[in-house]
Image (tube, rainbow, N blue to C red):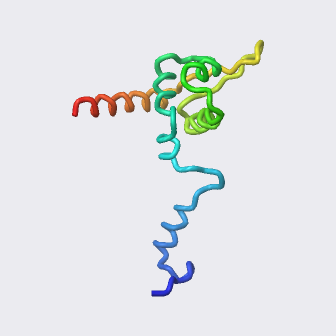
Amino acid sequence: MEPRPFNQLPEEIRIALGKRKKKENERPLMDLIESKYVLSMILYLDRMSPVLKSDLYHDIARGSGMLNKIDELRELGILEIYCTARTNTNVIVITDKGRTVAERIRDLIKSIERL
């Protein structure tokens, strides 16, 4: 069985393969969800929002990867970041979508605990 060139594949297979291509620097959503502190961060924001970014770092984690995780959650619409005018601080607020995600995480935890 020799591999076929892309242009010789049936059209539905070419369409399916075309949809699988990732954008540059885009990682799968499951990678973000499975990464360290993301679920804790969402639950923390649901409980404490609005919070200063420095409080999030202090209470959850101080790792260098936290900034990327915060940015990715913002891009997903789970949180929003506001810069204050008078000081050089960032305020993080959970969105309605983020509250829904947090509720589902708590439901998942409850389901696991019941088993």
Q: Is residue 105 above or below residue 82?
A: below
Residue 100: x and y in percent read 42, 30
| Residue drawn where x is 56% and y is 82% of the image | 5
| Residue drawn where x is 52% and y is 83% of the image | 4
| Residue drawn where x is 71% and y is 18% of the image | 89
Q: Is residue 4 left or right of residue 25?
A: left
- Looking at the rendered structure, the number of numbered marks drawn on it comes to 0
Residue 105: x and y in percent read 39, 31
Position of the N terminus by quadrant: bottom left
Q: Is residue 52 above or below residue 33?
A: above
Position of the C terminus by quadrant: top left
In this view, the residue farthest toward the left is: 115
The foreground one among 60 and 8 is 60
Residue 78: x and y in percent read 53, 32
Residue 98: x and y in percent read 49, 30
Q: Is residue 46 left or right of residue 23?
A: left
| Residue drawn where x is 55% and y is 66% of the image | 18
The foreground one among 108 and 17 is 108
Q: Is residue 56 above or below residue 100?
A: above
In this view, the residue farthest toward the bottom is: 1
